[in-house]
Amino acid sequence: MRKIYVIICICLMTAMNTMAQPASSDNGLTMRQQHIVKITSCTGKGDLENLKPALAAGLDHGLTVNEIRELLIHAYAYCGFPRSLRALQTFIAVLDERKAQGIEDTVGRDASPVEDNRTRYERGRDILAKISGIPADAPKAGYAKFAPAIERFLKEHLFADLFERDVLTYSERELATVSVIAALGESVEPMLRGHIAICQNLGMTEEQLDQVLAIATTGIANCAVKDIFPKGNKLPDTPNFTGEAWLEMFVTKADSMDCTVGNVTFAPGVRNSWHSHPGGQILLCTSGEGRYQEKGKPVQVLRPGDVVKIAPNVIHWHGAAPDSEFTHIAIGSQQSKGGAVWLEPVTDEEYDNQ
């Protein structure tokens, strides 16, 4: 397996020609949207272990108690009462723990009263038409024609009772919906396509939606990758890393291939110092969530499947997100030009500027 991977890496280096590319563009998800996806996808999977830190991170980055509570309520329409209620119970525990630590979380506003005299069916019908772009009077087909009762329940309850609650925007509710459905897996794929289309009608880009799917399915991807590549040995204490990191080398300078290939794992919140590579570097992100920044540019979020191509002598740093371990394959190209040039540590202010 390692030999095959090395061949792939060499091909990648040749094709990429060490040209710098950002991990994601300015058109990606905002931090708020990323937290919405993490919270609702964990709820959809029933992954309470990872939901707990996701809830805390959402609160830390500006989501209010009522907004998160609304996300967990909304999720029940797609993953069922049991998982929604367990998520709410987990949220109560998180809030209790934070209160005991002296953290005062912002409650936020509640839903506004509905002032519309039309029937719930009419209101829900029109909301669905607005967000989907499909006329309200379009002929009924499929399940709506076969089971008129569920079509009425859908319009009255989901698109009226839930979507009218303005704690969240229509776009945020659809973002949550896609996240939950993606987390549920292939069995509901036709629904996923339908809600992706609604997200696009509401203005979300293809890049943003790709990011949503990557986050929502990260747990599955991580398990597969971690079974393939060993974590390696813990690195000795060094001023070039802020904390614990592990390394497993696949290709070294002694192999005379003019490159190095290693598997690097960062503990949550750990990053390396500012540095550059005379021959450039390539990062293949395999698990967790990471951070990357080039000098003078914004911090980039890294996820499994991202490829970062760093041009020669570009000053940068990379590491793990505050609440996630992060692993990448690091390829040091053109080693004949020299090894890494280490510079000053990344300050907490630089790391937190996301």
Image (cartoon, grey):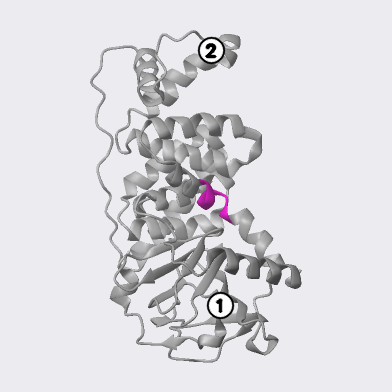
Magenta part of the chain: 213-218
Mark 1, residues whose alpha carbon is within 10 Å: few (<14), some, or many (≥20)?
many
The residue under the point 58% across, 63% down is: 15
* Amino acid type, mark 1: Ser
Q: Is residue 148 above or below residue 7?
A: above
Q: Picture quarter containing residue 296? A: bottom left
Q: CA distance from mark 2 to mark 1?
A: 62 Å
Identified at 43% across, 91% down, the residue is 239
Label placed on residue 333: 1
Q: Is residue 322 visible?
A: no
Q: Is residue 255 above or below residue 118?
A: below
274 lies above or below 6: below
- Which numbered circle lies on residue 149? 2
Foreground residue among 283 and 177? 283
Above or below, 17 relative to 315:
above
Q: Is residue 47 left or right of residue 256?
A: left
The image's mark for residue 224 is none
Tell me the mark number nearer the camera, choosing from 2 and 1.
1
Q: Amino acid at mark 2?
A: Ala
Residue 318: within the magenta? no
Residues at discs 2 and 1 in contact (Cβ within 8 Å) = no
Helix, strand or loop at mark 1? strand
